[in-house]
Image: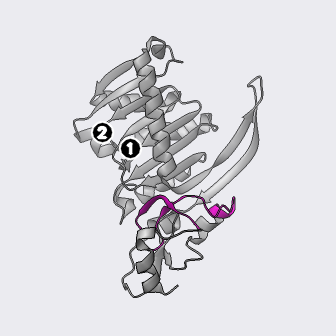
Amino acid sequence: MIKFLDGDAISAKIIQTIREANQYLTFVSPYIKLNDKVKSELTYLVRTKPTVEIKIVFGKNDKNPNKSLSNDDFEFFKTLGNIRISYVKELHAKIFCSEARLMLTSLNLHEYSQTNNFEAAFVIEHSGTILGSLVSNKAETAWEEALDFVDKVIESSIPVYHKGKVYETSWLGFSAKLVEEYDEDNSETFFKRTLPANDSVNFGFCIRTGVNIPFNIKAPFSDIAYKSWKRYGNESYKEKYCHYSGEASDGETSLKSPVLKKNWKEAKAKFNF
């Protein structure tokens, strides 16, 4: 079933989605500033359902991403444990979803938007829920296409923070066994990235995170990004940025080819490699 919402009904539906999440909860919002109610609900969710996987994607303000996600809210998210936080410079979409429903909306997850703006949303209830059992084939198709879009956004995002645990549930569903823990924190280099003041300094860009690092054709990763890359060690793995210009590479760079072809001659002349 697809339903239209506006005003306070959108915020109420977000709270309902947090409360009812059992498997995953995903927030895609360029700007994030949490109110106390959302923080309280997220804290309760993690305390009562620690296996729920939370994904946060924010965007905009490439030169100062703290304007899109404040340090206070970032530190709060880190307390939730089983969470992935990532960034997309070009992000404009706002989507909030769980396994039960998906909301496509004009609303940023921002207390000002929730209080002051005229906002609207469409909500799709999944066919596995009671409301969703009334869903049409068109709504089911829209659900799948929207989830594919969310996956694409997450896949193209820069990982900023990723920490959590993977559980294996017994076949009866009465217990869960911890099988893996992960902890990847790129926040220090991500939030502090700035353009070099002196262009004559041999600065380049990390091909995975876009942060400023010394230009080195053989070492185009920041220290943290290199540790992440080293897990698999694939020299041809498609990365996100050009080591020379810092522009998005759309997967055309890798450890093997860290500079975009169009920039190769210029980079070679400047850095003499």
Q: Nearer the viewer, residue 40 or 135?
A: 135
Q: Is residue 126 magenta?
A: no
Q: Position of residue 45 (x, y in %)?
A: 55, 36
Mark 1 vs mark 2, foreground winner is: 2
On screen, residue 123 versus residue 252, left or right, reads left
Quarter where residue 191 is shown = bottom left
* Mark 2 residue crowding within 10 angstroms, few (<14) / some (14–19) / many (20+): some
Which amino acid does the dot numbered 2 rest on? Gln
Residue 35 is tagged as: 1
Q: Which residues are magenta?
A: 228-255
Q: Which residue is mark 2?
A: 114
Q: Nearer the viewer, residue 121 or 92?
A: 92
Q: Secondary structure at mark 2?
A: helix
Q: Residue at x 60, y 59 (%)?
A: 237
Residue 80 appears anywhere in the view = no
CB within 8 Å, label 1 to label 2: yes
Which amino acid does the dot numbered 1 rest on? Asn
Task: Give above or below for 86 relative to 271.
Answer: above
Q: Residue at x 59, y 32 (%)?
A: 23
Q: Position of residue 216 (x, y in %)?
A: 55, 79
